[in-house]
Every structure is written in C-alpha cells, then in structure tokens.
Amino acid sequence: MYQVRRVNIGKTDQLDELAHECGRLYSQTLVSFWRTVRHKDIWLKPKHLMRWYTSEKLHAHTSDACVQAFFASLKSWRTRRKSDPFAAPPRKRKWYFRIEYKSSALHHNDGVLTLSNGKGSAPLVLKWPWQTPKTVVIRWTGTQYEAVATYKTVVQGHPQGDRVAGIDLGEVHMAVSHDGEQTHILNGRLLRSKRQYQNKLKAKLSRLIDVKKRGSRRSKRLACSKRKQLKKVKSQIKDVEHKQTTHLISTLHVQGVQTVVIGDVREIKQGNDTGSINNQRIHQWSFGSVRHKLTYKAEQLGMKVVLANEYTISHRSTVKVRERLDKREFWQLRKKKG
C-alpha cells in the first residue's frame, strides 16, 4: 500500500536543466530502440540500453528510470493494441521529461531532503518537514514543477470479528452505508453543485471561444483561462471526495466495522439511455474514483473490502438505479394505463 504527497517547488534553472537532460536521455533511448528494430529486427531489453546511455548530470538510477519509462510505455502499447488496433507505439521525442529519484538518491536530515545528481551537477535541496519518501518524481504541471513523493505504508492486520457494513454508491448522494444498526449518508449536495458549475463554465467559455477568430490573441487567452478555471474546479471536486470518504471510513472504523461491502455499479453506463440530462449525470458520476478512495482508506485501517453485486446490498435502490426502459416501452406502458 502506497501514499502520495504532492508539493509545489516552483521553477528554477537547475530544474529546467535536469528535466532537459532527462528528455535527452529518453529521446536517445527511443531513437536507438526503433533504429535497431528497423535495421536489425532486434527488440532490445531495458538492461541493454541502460548500459549504453548514462548521464554525468543525473544520478545513475535516475538515468535508468528514464530508460525504464520508455519500456513501460512500450509495454502499455503492447497491451492496449490487443483491444485497440489503432493504438500507436511511443515514437515522440521529449525535450523535457520527468525527473525520478529512487531511494538510493534520497537523503533526509533536519527537515531538508537532498536529491543526489551526477558528479557534474549539484544536488537538489528541498525543504521537507515530513519523513523520508521511497521515491520522488519531479514533473511539470504547466505553471511550475511539482514533487510527487511516494510513501510505503504498513497495512494493519484485519481485526477479529464479523461486523459488516454495506456501502451503496449513488449519483445524488455519494455513498450510503448501513451495518444493520446505523445508517450514514454522505450528502452529495456540494459535489453536485461543483459538477453543475463545471458544466456551466464549460458551456460559457466554449461559447465565447467559438465566436473568436481561431488562433487570435483573445481566443488563446480564453482557452488559457478555461484550462485554469476547469483545473481549479477539478481540484475542488477531488478535495470533496477525499474529505467525504475519509469521514465515512473513519466513522465505520470507530464503530468496529471489520468488513466493508461496496456495491458494484461499473456496468450502469453500458446500454443505458435515459435522456440527455440523466445521461450526462450518469456519465459524470465518478463512482470509480469514490470506490478507489473508500477501498484504499479502509485497507489502511485494516478493514477488509469486498466488491459485490449491488443487488445483494440494497435491492430497492438497485431497482431504481438500473431501471432501463426506452422511450417506446415507456409510452406503451403509459397508453395501457391511460
């Protein structure tokens, strides 16, 4: 089980230089791999190119991470092309690339995290009042650099007992839990208001951009403003989901719940046409994100998580959510009643 901490570290010449060096190393790996395939019909392995390409400015394991990143993309393409015949392999060179530091390059002392580089480059120093992470990845967010630190957490053993709580995910309310005695409802009003504002903001800014000349200064300014505002709303939605799910799991843990059963609604978007408004709500329903947050937060506290058919959790709510009548059947039923 892993936890992630994100810290904004601004923009400096040193970070630009290191990111550019990682991009150069990634591009060399990409070019050499495909050139060997084209001329020799040989598919090289990561260990071959990690021996060929290193950098004096980067730590040895940081250089290896750049090579491994290309082969990770290659593996992802091989898996995806089995279901998507139009999937394209990684062929684009990178001018800048993420900087990955492994545990061998991290040194933490007195609230300062030192990230070691090669002999030809000074170490990167960050203020770090937290514990030493397992890995640190520095990437560009569009406005500044961000340090993404990964921590390995120790999962507690499953407590003894048989108290079970069922969680029903919903579009109106984020989640509803019931353990046979008490019921907890996560009010979805705030999340729904954020979604509604997000949709109105998209429509308003898109309408303003459409009437501007394509490629003009005003069009570019509006597009930049649209990206920034939508990014802010997306962060607010993510924050609401984190706070609500943390509150629910903490409450269940205090009450002594040992097993959490979450309803499986992954197929609700398939073949479900209930009109433009309801379709928009269902397709913007982030039940996968909520389920993931509930799962890993419960497992961190030693609770067992089971994904079950929603029918076994709440028959009544399942019937309401999964009622799939097309317009023809609806009018036929209405004529029979009338």
Image (tube, rainbow, N blue to C red):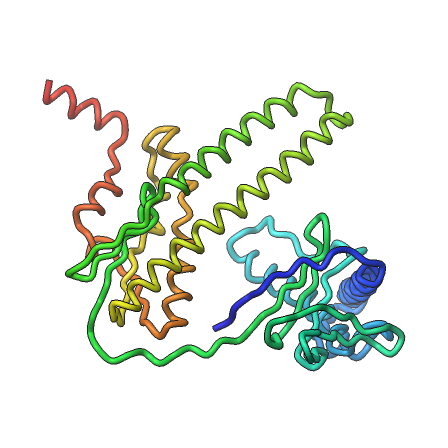
Q: Residue at x 19, y 52 (%)?
A: 314
List the single residue furthest toward the front: 110
Q: Nearer the viewer, residue 239 or 109?
A: 109
Q: Is residue 35 visible?
A: no
Q: Nearer the viewer, residue 53 or 86?
A: 53
List the single residue furthest toward the right: 120
Q: Residue at x 38, y 79 (%)?
A: 156
Q: Residue at x 46, y 79 (%)?
A: 154
Residue 115: x and y in percent read 74, 74
In the rendered image, the vertical position of residue 153 relative to residue 292, given as above or below: below
Residue 288: x and y in percent read 41, 53
Residue 104: x and y in percent read 70, 82
In the rendered image, the vertical position of residue 225 relative to residue 11, given as above or below: above
Q: Is residue 44 left or right of residue 303?
A: right
| Number of disc labels | 0
Q: Nearer the viewer, residue 193 or 42?
A: 193
Occupied quadrant, residue 94: bottom right
Q: Is residue 145 left or right of residue 14?
A: left
Q: Residue at x 38, y 29 (%)?
A: 277
Q: Is residue 26 left or right of residue 223?
A: right
